[in-house]
Image (cartoon, rainbow, N blue to C red):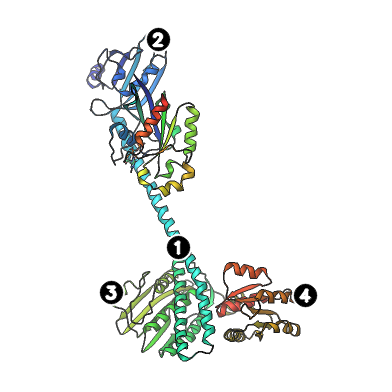
Amino acid sequence: MLTKYIEKYHKNNFQYILVDDAGKILEQDNPILPLTIGENIQDIHPFFEILTHLLPTIDESFEFSCINLDYNNQETLVVDISLKTSTNNNNLVIIENLTNHYNNYQLTAQSRNESIINSQILVLKNEYLLEKETFKNNFIANFSHQLRNPITASTIFSDLLINSNLNSEQKNYLQIIQSANKDLKQRIEDILDISKIESGKLILVNKVFNLKELLKNLEIIYSYLGNKKGIHIQFNIESNIPEFVEGDQYRLKQIIGNLLTNALNFTNKGSIIMNVSLNYFRAKKVNLHFEIIDSGCGIDDESINSIFDRFTKLDTTAGTGIGLGLAIVKYLISEMGGNISVESEVNKGSKFTFNISFKTSNHSNDQKIEILKNQTPQLKRKYNVLLVEDSEVIQLSILKILASTGLFYIHIIDKAEMLIPHLIDNKVDLILLSNTIQDFSAITLASSVRNLSKEYKKTPIILLSTQGYKDDIKHFKKNSINHVLVKPFDKNKLLELVKQSLK
Amino acid sequence: MTISKKIVLIGHFGVGKTSLIRRFVENTFTEDYKVTIGVHISKRTINISENEDISLIIWDLEGQDDIKKTRPSYLLGTNGFIYVFDLTRPVTFEHLNDELAFLKENFVTTPIKVVGNKVDLVNKIYLKEHSEQFDNVVDYFVSAKTGSRVEKLFAKLAEELI
Ligand SMILES: Nc1nc2c(ncn2[C@@H]2O[C@H](COP(=O)(O)OP(=O)(O)OP(=O)(O)O)[C@@H](O)[C@H]2O)c(=O)[nH]1
Ligand SMILES: [Mg+2]
């Protein structure tokens, strides 16, 4: 029975061929390849040319798997071929037809290889895009940094100039320059922020801070700015908001400041209202609701959808674009776990609304105050600060800043010649030294201080410098100067550095 | 008189071994990628001098991400190698030197031509950027697509086989 089945179902998968040492076909059984006796097997397909070298061997066995035989334009056969050589010119070639098997394998290999290659190409594209992106962001960051110095110089000198003898027309021009400087500086800060955002380098610094005080300070500044423009700015701050929260106070200031500045820029009559209220306390978090409402020119329906996008600008007669500011604001708010929205009507005004959550801590108020104290160095006694500066504007502003703390006795001299005599007669704990003192370089002055006596070898000297390049700063620091504060500096920077130097 | 020589194309999958052979043997090219499994063998006779022909039996091997995995029987009796990599895919030339060392160790006297294929897809700057990897190693930058330097590659190798 089985023999019958075998006869019926036997697959003719094998072909046995006998060839002589030259490759001439002597016998063959079953036509997988249609061969003629007497023909040379090497003429059948170039594969068999390999036999030239192998047939003369004796009693050897060779196996070749997965050979594609394209034969007379017929469907390609994929076969395994083995060769057994012998002494008597009777070499056996066995062909096993495995076309189906190998075709299946081909399909698997096809999809495997294609998917591997595709993923490699994706990786490459990605790398390329990332490289471009990094280049762009680095370029922007470096370039913006380089712009800072010329703008600083321009700011300082127009500040110095405005207090000199100018007629009112000249003063007007200078004020335009000053405001352009400020604008430019803000834009550069914005570009830097955007490039930080894009490269993932903008990181919030969360610390405990006094929220009420921060809002109070903003109120003072913006009420003043509003008054100057004849716009009343009303702050409504609910008393039940917590005094201390944990968050990034500088970024919060930036958000509110940006929105208030926009409101001021776009409002020519009427008023601006800033509301801060408590949404809820939950799970050691407080959620606050902020509203900034102006009666300005408003935003039309078309623009309103894109005002938070990067690189869009409201086109208004006011001339002051909002630039990148709102994109940054939106990003910062979302980083703080909140969101911002806007409603507006043309010629009626706009209302920006946002929520932010802050962590509230369990510290008692005393502990909080203690935390704050540790953040900015506290001084143990009153110190004597000597300011060597010939610009009256700067003298005045430094005097204001230092005096407001009640922590310092301040002496001012405006001529280099007075420096040494003053040091001899008075006790000085810290010297603020300008680098623009007439006829003397700051380094000369600093080293004369150091050479004066042992007492002054370690007295901190902070240089108030118009030069902010890295190399300059390095040079100063090598030459008797402890710190360099690049003009224009703000109140906080000055105070921080002074306190730090005295600690 | 015709002599016959076996040339083996070897390299990672998808680098264009089959395409280079089709360009050389049939002067055609297709964008489609059909993965080779096992080996395809084809033949082209070229004339090297007035009355001397050389018949190149060209073995087109299945691509491997590591050529040490190649079935040894395929390499039996090889007269010359063409090692192909894909200029656009760094993975295919990452271990170029290792792979070549392997071939040179096992086939001490067999000539090897190293080619970077798909040169039509890259520019001079790219080649320059990779010059450290390619200089002193690569014999030809070729393109099966445009046919650039394909004929030259085979002719040069054939010349060395006589
Ligand atoms: N642009 C371009 N594409 C090429 C070139 N050579 C090959 N290709 C393409 O690359 C893909 C792979 O080519 P193949 O010749 O099949 O590669 P292979 O080395 O034989 O691949 P395996 O058989 O899997 O080892 C195909 O889509 C070809 O069209 C070339 O010179 N230029
Ligand atoms: Mg192939």
Q: Which of disc 4 and disc 3 is earlier in sequence?
A: 3
**Residue A87 numbered mark, or none:** 2
Subunit that carries the residue with mark 3: A
**Residue A454 numbered mark, or none:** 4
Q: How far apart are the alpha carbons under marks 3 and 1?
A: 30 Å
Amino acid type indicated by mark 4:
Lys
Amino acid type indicated by mark 1:
Asn
The answer to whether residue A399 is left or right of residue A34 is: right
Q: Position of residue B33 (x, y in %)?
A: 31, 40
Quadrant where the C terminus of chain A lies? Answer: bottom right
Q: Which of disc 2 and disc 3 is earlier in sequence?
A: 2
Quadrant where the N terminus of chain A lies? Answer: top left
Q: Are the residues at dot 3 and dot 1 in contact (C-beta closer than 8 Å)?
A: no
Q: Position of residue B80 (x, y in %)?
A: 41, 28
Beta carbon at label 2 within 8 Å of ligand 2: no
Amino acid type indicated by mark 3:
Glu
Do marks 3 and 4 share a chain?
yes
Going 38% across and 50% down the picture, which residue do you hit? A122
Q: Position of residue A397 (x, y in %)?
A: 57, 85
Q: How far apart are the alpha carbons under marks 1 and 4?
A: 49 Å
- The residue wearing badge 3 is A302
The answer to whether residue A433 is left or right of residue A346 is: right
Q: Position of residue A346 (x, y in %)?
A: 29, 82
Residue A414 visible? The answer is: yes
Q: Nearer the viewer, residue A107 or A228?
A: A228
Q: Quadrant of residue B25?
A: top left
Give the farthest residue toward the top: A88
Give the farthest residue toward the right: A454
Q: How far apart are the alpha carbons under marks 3 and 4?
A: 71 Å
Subunit that carries the residue with mark 4: A
**Residue A137 numbered mark, or none:** 1
Do marks 2 and 4 share a chain?
yes
